Image: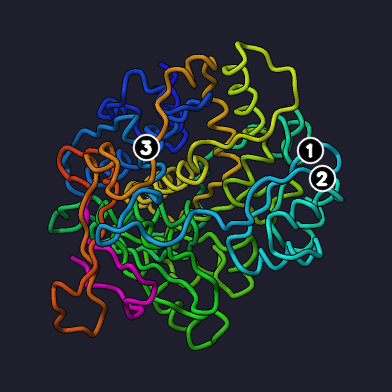
Amino acid sequence: MAHRNAGEALWKLAGLPAGKLSRLNLSMNPDPAVDSSFRLGTAAQTSIGLSALSAAYFHELRTGVQQDVQVDARRAVLEFKSEAYYTMDDQRPAGDLFDPLAGTYKTKDDNWVRIHTNFPHHRDGILSVLQCPGTNDAVASALLDWDSFKFEEEAARCGLVATAYRAFDQWDSSPQGKALEGASPVVIRKVAEAPKRDVPTIPPSMPLDGVRVLDLTRVLAGPICGRTLAGHGADVLLVTSPKLPDLPFLDADTSRGKRTTQLDLTSQDDRDKLTSLIKDTDVFLQAYRPGGLAEKGFDVDDIVRLKKGKGVVYASLRAYGWEGPWKDRRGFDSLVQTAMGFNHAEAEAYLSFRNGGKVDMKVAPRAFPMQALDHAAGYLLAFGINAALCKTVTEGGSWEVQVSLAAVGNWIRSLGRLDPQVAFGEGKPLPPRSVPQDQEIAAIAVELNQSIADGIQKIIPEGRKRMSAVRHSAKLSETPVRVGEASMRLNANTPRWLDRI
């Protein structure tokens, strides 16, 4: 029953009525849903299930319609790697999740560090610190001159992203590990008074119909949250900067169902455009580096002030939380896994499986089979936003929602472990990324057309791209998740809201 208790605890912590949990139907034995010693099937179906159930409850508050939600664990873990499985016009898209230089490297203290180089400025910064050419061999050679923890500190000092390889006990005893002890994976707090949200006179057909979301996020967790809200009917406007690097391989999948626009927040004119959008938004979703939006006048207090007494939900994502010496550090899923001890624990479990229970050597890092922290954080952030929207109906007010990858990591760890023989002997690996799609992926794929950009009155159907992607795994009995279209570019729309239904 651990899988059910995981969802129940978070639902109650959000202050939502416990009786609604009876409408969430999860796999009875979710693990091992994938080949991992951690209960990733439980984490996947619980986080996705809570995001869907909270959307259904918001819909009930506005329409009186009750519905059931069902999530299969294997379907959920496949959705946890959706970015790997989409195709474009029946072709495998160019790109990959990681830059060729990213990964783990040995250091002179007989340890490892993981570096993240997906963005050009992070890649250039790492090479500048190492004073070496941009090849894997050169990086490997240069890092053999560094102590792993000293390199981690130097990278952080330079605003770069790299972490040393730790075991659980090392993380737990670290200042940041201690600061996060007991931290909730989802924090929802009231930040201002505001009138209760009006119930529509015409019942909406989708849970989040009429809800406007400004999505200022990149990479995985934040965009997955926005994609989930769009799937439940929200008008999600993804706002990126034309001056910041993008990740087209990821953006194509995570922007499904959204409209997209670009604003340069270093420009006063574009800041004014964002301010105008904020006045009519219901949700402000952001994952900028800590302090990044505050510098531009768009922190939570700024957004509440711009709303002029109307309620708003301000949702934020961080890597390492809001407390401790690492609270302002940049981070990504793979780095948080390494720093917190997950890669060490997974490696020990796998070695135990291979060696008949014996682990008598220093183990090299082994990552999760997917970016589980990112995906779980994205769905839990959507859950927190939906829960806060429910509170705007029942209580009124403006609300802040906070989710961090590290706190989500603690939550996944709290779900417990599997015996290595069960985890890797019975757990089914994820299917390969291939064209044509693997049979298991093809069975759950959905077809999406490229959305038509603003200002284009007519387009030849053959000229629109076609995407095949993993369908959302949550099944809602009355309001199935909307498939929609796929923007496939970051500047398809003008910065304006659609008319409310």
Q: Is residue 395 visible?
A: no
* Residue occupying image coordinates x 57% and y 28%: 413
Residue at the spot of label 1: 111
10 Å crowding of disc 3: few (<14), some (14-19), many (20+)? some
The picture places residue 248, in percent across and down from the top left corner, at: 43, 65
Cβ atoms under marks 1 and 3 closer than 8 Å: no
Horizontal placement of 292 versus 465: left or right? Answer: right
Query: Type of residue at label 1?
Result: Asn
Horizontal placement of 17 versus 371: left or right? Answer: left
Tell me where the magenta segment starts and ends, as one range. 482-501
Separation (CA) of disc 2 from disc 1: 9 Å
* First in sequence: mark 1 vs mark 3: 1
The picture places residue 225, in percent across and down from the top left corner, at: 41, 52
Residue at the spot of label 2: 149
| Residue 361 lies in quadrant | top right
Residue at the spot of label 3: 431
| Quarter of the image where the N terminus is located | top left
* First in sequence: mark 2 vs mark 1: 1
Query: Type of residue at label 3?
Result: Pro
